[in-house]
Image (cartoon, rainbow, N blue to C red):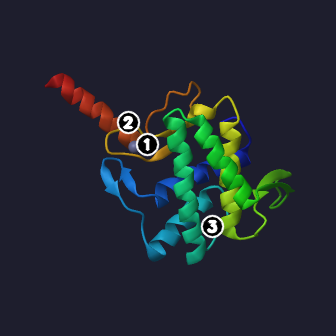
Amino acid sequence: MNFNSHTDAVVSIAVGLVNALTEGEARGRPYAPPTGEARAAAVGDVLAAGDRRAPEVAEEEVDALAEVAGRLRGVFEAVTRGDVDAAALALNELLAETDARPHLDRHDGEPWHLHFHGAGGTLAGNYAAGCATGLAVVLGSELHDRLGVCTAPHCDRVYVDTSRNGTRRFCSTACQNRVKTAAFRARGA
Ligand SMILES: [Zn+2]
């Protein structure tokens, strides 16, 4: 997308957290989030994607992030059903609760860039604040309808459409191919 690299990174993390930590269906199969150490590792992987340093995530931080992920899912679902008002209200609640506040930071030889930390200073609180802010930036832009839930059968994983013309409908190429194959079979039958 065309915001800045940090916003894009936290938006990707929001997508990653929702897809890893919320129950439902994924690519044609029922999906249950991993538990215990596997869940902590999955969260570490998601957080590392936006940052070079993969953090160790404590159990209670994972619990907090799982709760946030459920609420972030609600934002994607609201946008998908065209209820942008509900999405905005949900994000405003999260921004208030996490006490997200902009803070210019410079580390690891990078130029100054904007972080959105919560006041609590916990890892989960910081990422919750960052994810809420990232989605709020998207929702407050002309690209607000780019938050989506996969339209393939038996899949409810979320995505952010970063394509140029905004025509993405699936969470993954796996789902895109499943739908294409099914359509091809239907034509052949
Ligand atoms: Zn999908």
Looking at the rendering, the quadrant in which ligand 1 lies is top left
Q: Is residue 3 visible?
A: yes
- The secondary structure type at the circle numbered 1 is loop
Which picture quadrant has residue 98?
Answer: bottom right
Q: In which quarter of the image is the N terminus?
A: top right
- Residue 51 % position (x, y): 67, 59
What is the spatial separation of the Cα atoms under label 1 and label 3, in whole angstroms? Answer: 24 Å
Closer to the camera in the image, 85 or 27: 85
- Residue 96 % position (x, y): 73, 55
Which residue is outermost to the left? 189
Badge 2 amino acid: Gln
Badge 3 amino acid: Ala
Q: Is residue 162 visible?
A: no
What is the spatial separation of the Cα atoms under label 3 and label 2, in whole angstroms? Answer: 30 Å
The dot on residue 101 is: none
Ligand 1 within 8 Å of disc 1? The answer is yes
- Residue 4 % position (x, y): 74, 42
